Amino acid sequence: MNRRIASIISMLILVGTTVAFAGPVAAQDASPTLTVDKVLVNRTGGVTAMGMVDCSAAVADYWRGIENVPDGTVVLVNVSWTAYQAAGRRTLRADLVDTQASPCWANTTQDVDPGRCKASASGILSPCRWDSGNWGSDGYQYGNGTFKPGTVHLHTVLEGGYYATDADGNLVSIGLYLESGFDMKAVRR
């Protein structure tokens, strides 16, 4: 038995040593950033979320500098999420699959709600607000139970980076993807 324990310990040391000497992982400097600012619960137990998204680094990387981005460019993303909340022995879950893209970067005010993005001195609109409202809904999602004010874990997925390439509005993606997890205090709306 002692031999078996010694064998396991030596394997763990070997694995730990291998990991410790592994080369550095390349940083994703050109990734978008996403924050969750609020999680709200309504009276009927639905849950919704909102925050900010900034694609400035990814846009600059894609076009090899902000100065190279064509005028009139609006970059759009979809932010989907899954909310979890402990409820006794159960875990509540509600999902939102985002079907309405939100801006995350723009160098034009055309087709961008001016109150949605922060404008810089150079005219760049970023970061931008995202929320859970899809095509006129209030954005509240109902899962397998009634959410209450308190701690909610939110797993977010940002996808897209779509921008129009011509007057017809054909979309191309710069291939943005980001997964994040947030523990937030949900409050009653």
Image (cartoon, helix red, strand yellow):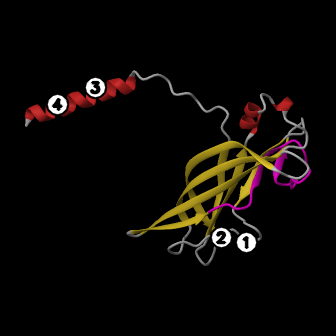
127, 171: nearer the viewer? 171
2 relative to 115 in the view: left or right: left
Q: Nearer the viewer, mark 2 or mark 1?
A: 1
Please, what is the three-letter code of the amino acid marked with disc 1?
A: Ser
Give residue 1's mark: none
Which numbered circle lies on residue 137? 1
Label 4 amino acid?
Ser
Q: Badge 1 local density, few (<14 within 10 Å), some, or many (20+)? A: few
**Is the C-beta separation of discs 1 and 4 under 8 Å?**
no
Quadrant containing the N terminus is top left
156 relative to 3, above or below = below
Indicate which disc, 3 or 4, sits on the residue closer to the N terminus.
Answer: 4
**How far is disc 1 from disc 4 in space, using C-alphas?**
59 Å
Residue named by callout 4: 7
* Mark 3 lies on residue: 14
Quick one: label 4 or label 2, which is nearer the N terminus? 4
- The residue range painted magenta reads 97-118
Q: Are marks 3 and 2 in contact (CB under 8 Å)?
A: no
Residue 185, quarter of the rendered image:
bottom right
Q: Which residue is mark 2?
A: 140
